[in-house]
Amino acid sequence: MYFLGVENGLARTRGVVLNLDSASIEAEAEVGHEFVGDLPSTHREQDPSQWVRAVDQVARAGLEALLLELSSGLERMREIGVKPETIRLTGGGLADAEVRRLVADVMGVAVLPLRGEVSPAMGAALQVAWTFFHQSGEELTFEEITSYAVAPEEGQRCEPNQARFKFYQDLLKRQEALVETVQGEQCAKGGHG
């Protein structure tokens, strides 16, 4: 489980994404503020619109960090020959076009939100149905199974921007190289890697 903490201070907005399972910080972001001009010298006020923009930037940085973590798993799937064509997005994120765009760009595949109220429990139920049919000898595709329960919202499909996808892939490679370096240093010092 992840937690996004945001603090609006006098001079800046800070945010962290905490992984509650490992008690580690997954991402940090900070955005500075300016004071409103043309006020008497005894008044120092911040522009509230800067707070809103700063919170947006901090939240986006946190979401990017989480999506990069997920994209490393998707990249491993690609390495073994699994080539996903779309991500079916459920939950609160599907309502926001910017979230759909970010998911598509980080993952490098089209994002297709599902129509109606679709929750993680529905996703789990569909996985169970797929397993049941395959163990029963019926070779139904996941698309066939989902067509009975959920409908895609084709009008809100979001294709990835390939330049942005490459940018995020480069970030992911840098992150993985840094993790390997840190783990190697810890192992060399006798710590756990």
Image (cartoon, rainbow, N blue to C red):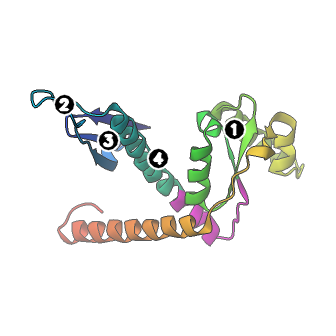
What residue range appears in magenta? 71-86
Eye-nearest disc, 1 or 3: 3
- Three-letter amino acid code at disc 4? Leu
- Looking at the rendered image, the quarter that the N terminus falls into is top left
In front here: 111 or 55? 55
Eye-nearest disc, 1 or 2: 2
- Three-letter amino acid code at disc 3? Gly
User: Where is residue 4 drawn, in percent x and y?
Assistant: 38, 37
Q: Label 4 belongs to which residue?
A: 63
- Three-letter amino acid code at disc 1? Gly
Q: In the displayed structure, does residue 46 sit left or right of residue 49?
A: left
Going 81% across and 41% down the picture, which residue do you hit? 146
- The image shows residue 7, relative to residue 161, as above or below, that is above
Q: Label 1 belongs to which residue?
A: 123
Going 47% across and 55% down the picture, which residue do you hit? 69
Q: Label 3 belongs to which residue?
A: 15
